[in-house]
Image (cartoon, grey):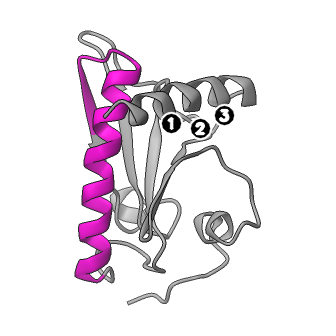
């Protein structure tokens, strides 16, 4: 098994070395906006515990991520008046994982509208900020 690399982007965000649009935080997890969203409101849930992916994550980290994912999925669906949500989690390069710190994607979905392709293009900060505000407001109403 490959060792966890503490220089990954999510570890840097957790240490406060890189900025993020924080949506939610508890003792075990954070939720932030994805800066390269495949849909408006694309959020990420990240455990605070250093785990590379699902293969090395201890049960308590998986449990915390699942509970926060459920909370964020409800907020994202509500904030964007979405028909549903897509939840994705990737493991290892062959499985599509790009950042090697466990994380879950939550994307609001609408009937008949496909997700944007993963282009690697960063969203404008004002769009991320506005979308984050919608999700934070929805979290308060849950």
Give the x, y percent position of residue 48: 48, 72
Dividing the picture into quadrants, the one containing residue 112 is: top left
Front residue (pair 52, 98): 52
Highlighted magenta segment, given as a residue range: 58-86
Residue under label 1:
118
| Front of the two marks 2 and 1 | 2
Check residue 121 in the rendering and tell me which mark sits there, or answer none: 3
Q: Is residue 124 left or right of residue 63?
A: right
Chain-order first, disc 2 or disc 1: 2
Give the x, y percent position of residue 68: 33, 54
**Tag 2 and tag 1, C-beta contact below 8 Å:** yes
Give the x, y percent position of residue 33: 55, 41
Q: Secondary structure at mark 3?
A: loop
Residue under label 2:
36
| Front of the two marks 2 and 3 | 2
Q: Secondary structure at mark 2?
A: loop
From what the image shows, is residue 4 above or below residue 70? below
Front residue (pair 56, 27): 27
Residue drawn where x is 66% and y is 30% of the image: 129
Measured Cα–Cα span from mark 2 to mark 3: 6 Å
Q: Is residue 59 left or right of residue 35?
A: left
Q: Residues within 10 Å of mark 1 (few under 14, many from 20)?
A: few
Q: Quadrant of the C terminus?
A: top left
Q: Is residue 121 magenta?
A: no
Give the x, y percent position of residue 7: 67, 77
């Amino acid at each position: 098994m490959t060792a966890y690399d503490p220089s990954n982007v999510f570890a840097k965000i957790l240490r406060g070395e890189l900025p993020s649009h924080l949506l939610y935080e508890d003792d075990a997890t954070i939720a932030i906006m994805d800066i390269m969203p495949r849909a408006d409101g694309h959020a990420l849930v990240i455990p605070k515990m250093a785990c590379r992916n699902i293969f090395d994550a201890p049960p308590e980290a998986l449990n915390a991520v699942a509970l926060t994912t459920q909370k964020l999925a409800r907020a994202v669906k509500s904030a964007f008046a979405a028909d549903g949500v897509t939840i994705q989690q990737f493991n290892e390069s062959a499985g599509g994982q790009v950042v090697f710190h466990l994380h879950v994607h939550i994307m609001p979905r609408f009937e008949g509208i496909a997700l944007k392709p993963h282009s690697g293009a960063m969203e404008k900060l004002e769009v991320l900020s506005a979308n984050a505000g919608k999700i934070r407001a929805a979290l308060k109403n849950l």
